[in-house]
Amino acid sequence: MSLRPASALQQIRAECSSCAECVRTCTFLQQQGTPAAIAGRGNAESNLLSAFGCALCGLCDAVCPEGLSPSAMLHAMREEAQVRHLVDLKPYSPWLNYEKLGRHPLFRRNLIPAGCGTVFFPGCSLPGSRPAAVRGLYRSLRHDDPAIGLVLDCCGKISRDLGLTERFHGVFNKLTDRLHKHGITRILTACPGCSTIFRNYAGQFEVVSVYEALVAGQGTGGKGQGAIKTGAVDANRAPSPVPIGPVVIHDPCPARFDAAQQSAVRQMLASCGYQVEELACHGQHTRCCGQGGMVEGYVPGTVRRESRIIAAETAGRPVISFCSACCETLAATTPTAHIADLVTGAAGFSNRPVHPLRRWINRLKLRFSRFP
């Protein structure tokens, strides 16, 4: 799934017209120049390392009139920098330690009933920040199919994005091998990043977002499409109050090209009575919240800068996203809720990100929770 830097640079150098369409909305490219200019600087150490200032969010791919993927070139540059041992990993230790600890048996769980072919894979961030929502979604999925399983684990996206390709495949292959041995053929994801990783690197599985599954009627007590408001809610909770006035949706950048997942989230909100308005940058043109690619480790202050740009675009309207990391980032600047909070009644809008220690406690509790 990766391009070697030489071929990636050569392709962009040969085919990029330097129209600068991608430069207009990207802080990184405004500083580094067009993809052709970056490719023209070749495999020089300073050029390879500059790729760590890119969020790998794919906005450049979305707007490129030539249909090129500058983000693939920049990821290949990261891989080459890692192969040549040019990267000081100390600034990235918080992310790498998070990934490593998240794979520890203390936080992993395979809850796979007999006859299970489908599992719910909520990812790393949602169980830490919203364990009640994870429980609510899982109960809803099992409403019609008690054989659906739950897997708490890490897909290794952090290592992948940092260009640590060998480490990523070591993590991801162990995960997929376990799923395959259990006879799993279908994975329901709640994290857009996990969705992308599974689809790109594990073609043996059918990968569907949990939001699409709920919209299709799974977990709605057989009531079918449009039954989200009553079927997807935890039996012990009520839906979160619908705010007076419109809300806006922030599409996470890993779901930039995932129109089905974007549509499902909007259908769920409409079913719950929300009046949804679109941000100027949405869908394929959504803006990264600043967390992408661990840019903060290379350019401190990126998260604050980018999240404030999105907050300004909301014009005071509450924000709903379907990425837990985005929610945690944007909550510091504008009232924010996760779609899973709202449809399960687990929580509403908040301006308070979850403390890191609390996230680990939440994950630990969820690991040892009993599910009926």
Image: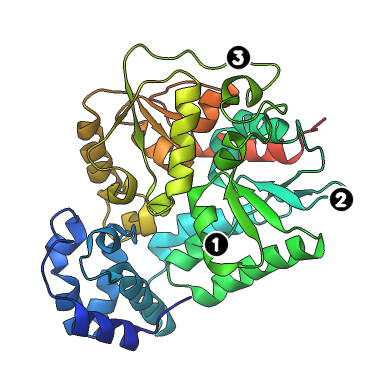
Relative to 331, 299 lies left or right? left
Using the numbered discs, state the Cα–Cα distance from disc 1 to disc 3 in whole angstroms: 34 Å
- Under tag 2, what secondary structure? loop
- Residue 156 appearing in the image: no
At label 2, the amino acid type is: Gly
> How many badges with numbers are in the image?
3
Precedes in sequence: disc 3 or disc 2:
2
The residue singled out by tag 1 in the image is 199
Q: Position of residue 81 (x, y in %)?
A: 36, 79
At label 3, the amino acid type is: Ala
- Under tag 3, what secondary structure? loop
Precedes in sequence: disc 1 or disc 3:
1
Q: Position of residue 67 (x, y in %)?
A: 27, 69
Comparing labels 3 and 2, the label whose residue is closer to the camera: 2
Seen from the viewer's position, the closer of residues 268 and 69 is 268
Comparing labels 1 and 3, the label whose residue is closer to the camera: 1
> Quarter-wise, where is residue 201 in the image?
bottom right
- Under tag 1, what secondary structure? helix
Relative to 213, 322 lies left or right? left
Query: CB under 8 Å between callouts 1 and 3?
Result: no
Using the numbered discs, state the Cα–Cα distance from disc 1 to disc 2 in whole angstroms: 24 Å
The vertical placement of 325 against 333, above or below, is below
Query: CB under 8 Å between callouts 3 and 2?
Result: no
> Quarter-wise, where is residue 251 in the image?
top left
The residue singled out by tag 3 in the image is 238
> Residue drawn 55% across and 77% down?
166
Extreme right residue here? 114
- Tell me, for residue 115, which label it has, or none: 2
